Image (cartoon, rainbow, N blue to C red):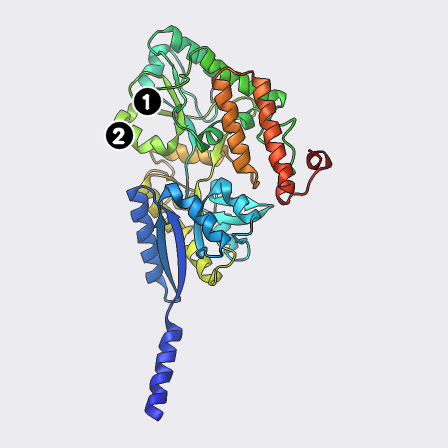
Amino acid sequence: MKAAAALLALAAAQAMAAPQEVTVWRHDTGDAEMAASKAMVERFNRSQDKWKVTVQAIPQGSYTEAITAASMVGQLPCVVAIDQPTVPNFAWAGHVQPLDGLLPRASVARLMPGGKGTYKEKLYSVGQFDVVLLLYARRSQLQALGVRIATVDQPYTAEELHAILQRAKASKRFRFPLDLNGRAKGEWVSYGFSPWLQSAGADLIDRTGYLRVDGVLNSPAALGVARYYSRLFKEKLAERNPADERGFEQGRSLLQYTGSWKAREYAARFGDDLVAMPPPDFGAGPKAGAASWQWAVTRNCPAPQGAAAFVDFLISPAEMAAMSRATGLIPVSEEAAALTEHYRPGGDWRIYFDFAARYATPRPATPAYPAISAAFEKTMSDLRSGKDAAEALDEAVEAIERNIARNHGYGFGARKEVASQ
């Protein structure tokens, strides 16, 4: 009997000592990122014996639908990867929990704006990396036209950029001098061009209360940006419906407005002839979108401390730097950047980190953002097709405020004039 009791006690002790499982969902991405992510999980599991992380990768095309379906039946894992602009919507719906009391303050304090996702001033997600918007050019082509290279201290103003494009067009060397990543749809449109609004002193919504769009998205400053954008196509400075995405690569465009995700490819292709310049300044300084995919802890996670330990591990400088080295993406802390060859001070890609630190502007932290983004995408499509700018912006304002009213302000309260619509 004593031997049996001892065996039972030993088995119970072993069971108690077994690490608790922490389940994680993420979407499939490129091979380099998936391999880096797998290695991080393995390092975390080896680093301690209290938690064991297991990861399920879901095809990107069905990822959002899978999360939504699982949330409806209470089957979400402990940790989920979420595209940062949608984090407020998940928080408002009650699917993820605040991280303020779970993550060490020092870990969060290191993060740049592109490393955090918030809703109503609470932290709900953190990330390892970011990208940044910029203008690419070839040094030799700028010199041939007598065009200066824009710098952090002296970016192109919107007016200067327009004049440069007109000069390039007149040279007959470039049929469409500005490549605007024109075949990209969906979130690229809001990510890429709402910073032009913010650079002009306008925005997609009033961020003081996240309820008012009228007078913001259709303000005089916003109208100026909309007309500027429309004029690029009317004057054939940018191609309305490009046949491919290789205008800049093949020398058909002088400039390309895109993201730093092209850094590795373009550095290999153009070498020292490549120039990375700030986004254009519409009056309030250049702005660039901030934040990419991030990690959140679900509301019903049975092991929130384990989930937090894993997420904290991911945003450590060493792990952030490892992800950057594998993917080429910008780390979102100075400490992590210092551990990389490219983004450390003096590194050949340091300029991208500096752009992110200086220009990054997170997209509006409201659950209405998916509706805002969809409405803005339609507006920009209408502008490319020649629609009147004031009419296009007014239609977007009406659609967004109607959505906010239907959802009772998304937790921000409802103004009388919104609620009455």
Q: Label 1 sits on what residue type?
A: Asp
User: From the viewer's perspective, is the residue at label 1 or at label 2 nearer?
Assistant: 1
Q: Is residue 113 visible?
A: no
- Between disc 1 and disc 2, whose residue precedes? 1
Residue sitting at x 37%, y 75%: 15
Residue ID at (55%, 57%) = 101
Tally the numbered discs: 2
The reply to whether residue 323 is visible in this rendering is yes
Quadrant the N terminus occupies: bottom left
The C terminus sits in image quarter: top right
| Label 2 neighbour load within 10 Å: few <14, some 14-19, many 20+ | few
Task: Give neighbour class at mark 1: few <14, some 14-19, many 20+ (Cα, 10 Å).
Answer: few
User: Where residue 351 appears, x then y in whole percent?
Assistant: 40, 32
**Horizontal arrangement in the rendering, residue 363 relative to residue 259 (left or right):** right
Which amino acid lies under the numbered mark 2 shown in the image of this protein? Ala
Furthest residue toward right: 416
Name the residue nearer the viewer: 395 or 164.
Answer: 395
Observer-nearest residue: 75 or 141? 75
Q: CA distance from mark 1 to mark 2?
A: 20 Å
Q: Position of residue 29 (x, y in %)?
A: 34, 42
Q: Secondary structure at mark 2?
A: helix
Report which residue position mark 2 lands on.
Answer: 268
Q: Residue at x 48, y 45 (%)?
A: 111
What residue does disc 1 label? 244
Q: Is residue 274 left or right of residue 369?
A: left
Mark 1, secondary structure of its residue: loop
State the image quarter where residue 223 is shown.
top right
